[in-house]
Amino acid sequence: MKTKTLKKNKVNVITLGCAKNIYDSEVMMAQLKANKFDVEHEAKQDDSEIVIINTCGFIDNAKEESINTILRYAEAKKDGQVDKLYVTGCLSERYKGDLEGEIPDVDAYFGTRELPKLLKTLKADYKHELVGERLLTTPSHFAYFKIAEGCDRPCSFCAIPLMRGKHVSTPIEQLVKNAESLAAQGVKELMFIAQDLTYYGLDIYKKRNLAELIQKVSEVEGIEWIRLHYAYPSGFPMDVLDQIRDNKKVCLYLDMPLQHGSSKILKAMRRGIDREKTTSLVHEIRKQVPGIAIRTTLIVGYPGETEADFQEMYDWVGEMRFERLGVFTYSHEENTHAFNVEDDVPAETKHERAEEIMDLQSGISYELNQERIGKTYKVLFDRVEGDYFIGRSEFDSPDVDNEVLVKKDSETFVTLGRFADVEITSADHYDLYGKLV
């Protein structure tokens, strides 16, 4: 029986996982709003009649979080705190049959490309005229900007093609319109995202066309920063570096997951590139774009990774001195190529290796940050927290990278969502402190 009054036609959308899921939730919310639903993202009040959970199914931790969230709301539904519960996204795409059997209290499960079907279940219309429209969940001055869906890469450890399908680029004309719409809403920073940015255009233009896309979007009035996420090293289109170096709207920033520093493991991962070519590419990027911040991610504990393989990667990280770096422990995923071999690195060893890499990176980050003291940077301010205004330089993406902190006082005035010049006065391992110029 119901224990509280629920607001009819109010929808609470909950997003788990990566920026691509955030984008998908924002599109779904725009469609719901156009169909006269009262929609909120991760509502603070539990008074929604309908809950939609957009799940992640990438690795074990993400899957566990998604399942726990579904179970929580399934219990809420039993208690009458939710009337209808729907699940969409990657976990639902990948494990729909299993989930229907194990958590039957969910009213319906939908895959990653079944938004029209979800809307129909809610007796809502999929409005084609809203293609590209979104209800932003991020602060109004930045937005994730998805340029393609799916992936054609054969990486042995990755289940994304199982959940997202083959690579499909969005045409340049549509993306320019999307950018214009976001700029009209006050968005200043676009973070280009895709499973693989560098593959952009091959399917519809028969060539890698990321550089042209960057140029066209940069011409949109109001957009001041373009940031590039998730570039693949093999087949990297070098003309993109001209845009990063010469186009004033493109941040000196490149997120390029490299995954490992051992040629043996890279070959097992089916990455299509070895350590030597990877190193050469990083050196060439830095040569062509002086001052660029390269963010990368690595995987430790891949099947067959010996202590010698790990040490090779550890030494390589020390040599490369990446400006930004994150680490995942290997997750043994069904129906991937790597699932056919034994997951032979113990979980404890995986975590120890991850900690070792991050300890090394912490020292590198501290040293690089010390070199920024006394320099002045353009900073985009995101929020206020405690005694500080908190923003980011062009070298930093939200949530994952360094932040710039300016102390609040009677003489310091900062407008959130605006740019200001900041002189760096001190720095620690992952934060810079400064004063307005």
Image: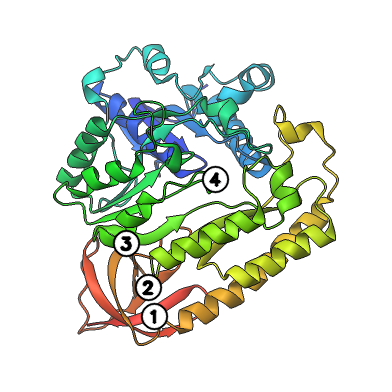
Q: Residue at x 33, y 83 (%)?
A: 375
Amino acid type of the residue tagged 2 in the rendering: Val
Alpha carbon distance from label 3 to label 2? 23 Å
Tell me, for residue 245, which label it has, or none. 3
Compared across the picture, whether 33 is left or right of 94 comes to left
Dot 4 surroundings within 10 Å: few (below 14), some, or many (20 or more)?
some
Secondary structure type for disc 2 = strand
Residue situated in front as seen by the camera: 55 or 6: 55
For mark 2, what is the residue?
Answer: 404
Q: Is residue 198 above or below residue 148?
A: below
Tell me, for residue 171, which label it has, or none. none
Nearest to viewer (mark 1 / mark 3):
3
First in sequence, mark 2 or 1: give its number: 2
Alpha carbon distance from label 1 to label 3? 26 Å
Cβ atoms at labels 3 and 2 below 8 Å apart: no
Amino acid type of the residue tagged 3 in the rendering: Arg
Residue situated in front as seen by the camera: 35 or 365: 365
Q: Is residue 83 above or below residue 363?
A: above
First in sequence, mark 1 or 3: give its number: 3
For mark 1, what is the residue?
Answer: 433
Cβ atoms at labels 2 and 1 below 8 Å apart: yes
